[in-house]
Image: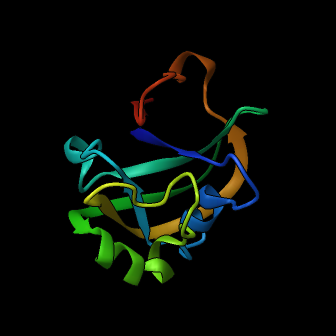
Amino acid sequence: MYAIYVNEPGCIPYARLIAEAYKTLETRSRNVFKQIIGERVAIVRTSRHSKPMIVGYATISGAEFISKADFQQLFSKHLVPPGSKFDCKGAGKWCYTMTNARPCEPYPLPQNRINHGRSYTEF
């Protein structure tokens, strides 16, 4: 199984929002999840102030590069506010459709599986 890292540097709990199916698009500036499209993945909450925690599971069921204008129109699916660290800063962003989400009680990602500087890891 794979685990994707979802950074939570502020007050918006992006990882939990994915796990509870409120955030149905996970966005990245590069096509980092192309090898794991179609896979069921663990959603890992990361931040500078806590250990990586698995908070749920979802399936990455598709990917699409969308323009900056489309990104703004899809706010209700990705929940990234304008001007935030994760806002679309270039021509567009990669959007990954997250389906079949389900939360779980948070538990730590095994220490030997933490892969700093990566977007996902296998465990």
Pick the front one: 61 or 11 = 11
Residue 109 x/y as whole percent: 61, 32
Does 77 sit above or below residue 40? Answer: below
Q: What residue is shown at x 42% (from left), y 49% (from top)?
A: 41
Q: What residue is shown at x 66% (from left), y 49% (from top)?
A: 8
Report the colour scheme. rainbow
Residue 20 x/y as whole percent: 60, 71
Task: Tell how many labels.
Answer: 0
Q: Where's the N terminus, which quadrant?
A: top left
Q: Quadrant of residue 62?
A: bottom left
Pick the front one: 82 or 29 = 82
Q: In the current view of this chain or complex, which residue is farthest to the top? A: 112
Pick the front one: 65 or 113 = 65
Q: Quadrant of residue 50?
A: top right
Q: What residue is shown at x 33% (from left), y 49% (from top)?
A: 29
Does 121 sit above or below residue 42? Answer: above
Q: What residue is shown at x 45% (from left), y 29% (from top)?
A: 123
Pick the front one: 40 or 9 = 9
Q: Quadrant of residue 58?
A: bottom left
38 left or right, relative to 99: left
Residue 121 x/y as whole percent: 41, 30
